[in-house]
Amino acid sequence: MSNNGWMVTKPSQNSESHPCSEPKPCSEPKPCSKEENYCCAKDMIRALRLLSNPSIKDDVLFDEFAFIGKNFLVGTALESDPDDNDNIFDPDATLTSIDPCQSDFINISGNSVVYPILATSISDAEQFPMAVNRVSLCNLDAIVFQYDPEATNFEDNLQKLLDKEYCCHRCNDARFGYGEDIFGCIFNPYRFGDSFLNFTAGWLACTEAKILGRVGNVLVLANTAYYPAVPVSRIYFVCLGSIGFYSAYLD
């Protein structure tokens, strides 16, 4: 069943809680290996499928997405004078659908690919004009999207979905592979209240991002900026393996 081009999946009927392992200290760094699959495509698909859940679907702005590629960007540009906790302009590409055939590609709609060069506006950014209708998830470091700013419970509802479906908000699980080491150091399970992060992921840089949870090797965060007095209603799906620089933000 589809809804405006969006491949709607049936919500999980499994209400059983997922087992969580006890928090572990950071392990010794592992050497990079080409044999290890650092592509988070399968987990990104799982994260995107959450957006078809009835509790949040109507509040997702599917025509306000940005795709942060390893060489180009689609739906945004790098902001030369950022003012809302990240370095990109408001997303303006469209997430059309998820390919149901176990593909590492998703269907999108964009008018150009944008070079990763600082700009004062998206229109001033250096772009290569070409229609874009598919993107390889293995070529992405992050997906950023907007939700309806009037949906004041959106982040809470998304966080509940993450906890219910993947048990990923306040627990570590070695089953998730390479990202487990990064997540174990980023997320502090002993700290009361919410956890916040300053991070870079490819061309994306963000400060004071609220950690909502994770889907395997995809970290889910929210923008905490207010501009000028209204929250920036923006969510980040970030490949843990793409995080380059980071630090905990203590509110």
Image (cartoon, rainbow, N blue to C red):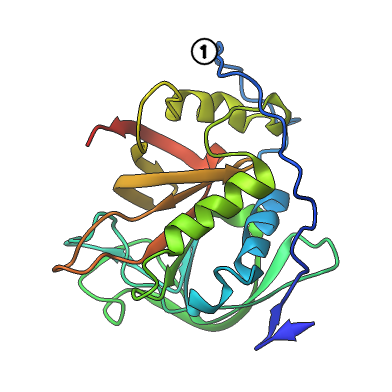
Q: Is residue 123 shown to the viewer in this render?
A: yes
Q: Position of residue 174 (x, y in %)?
A: 68, 24
Q: Is residue 142 shown to the viewer in this render?
A: no
Q: Position of residue 99 (x, y in %)?
A: 77, 71
Quarter of the image containing the N terminus?
Answer: bottom right
Closer to the camera in the image, 147 or 163: 163
- Which amino acid, by three-letter code, is at mark 1? Pro
Q: Position of residue 195 (x, y in %)?
A: 37, 36
Up the image or down, 19 lies above or below 40; here it is above
Q: Residue furthest bottom?
A: 4
State the image quarter where residue 35 is shown.
Answer: top right
State the image quarter where residue 106 is shown.
Answer: bottom right
Closer to the camera in the image, 183 or 93: 183
The number of numbered badges drawn on the structure is: 1
Up the image or down, 19 lies above or below 207; here it is above
Residue pointed to by mark 1: 25
Q: Secondary structure at mark 1?
A: loop
Quarter of the image containing the C terminus?
Answer: top left
State the image quarter where residue 192 is shown.
Answer: top left
Tell me: 105 left or right of 214.
right
Q: Which residue occupies 58% across, 68% down?
A: 55
Q: Which residue occupies 43% across, 50% down?
A: 221
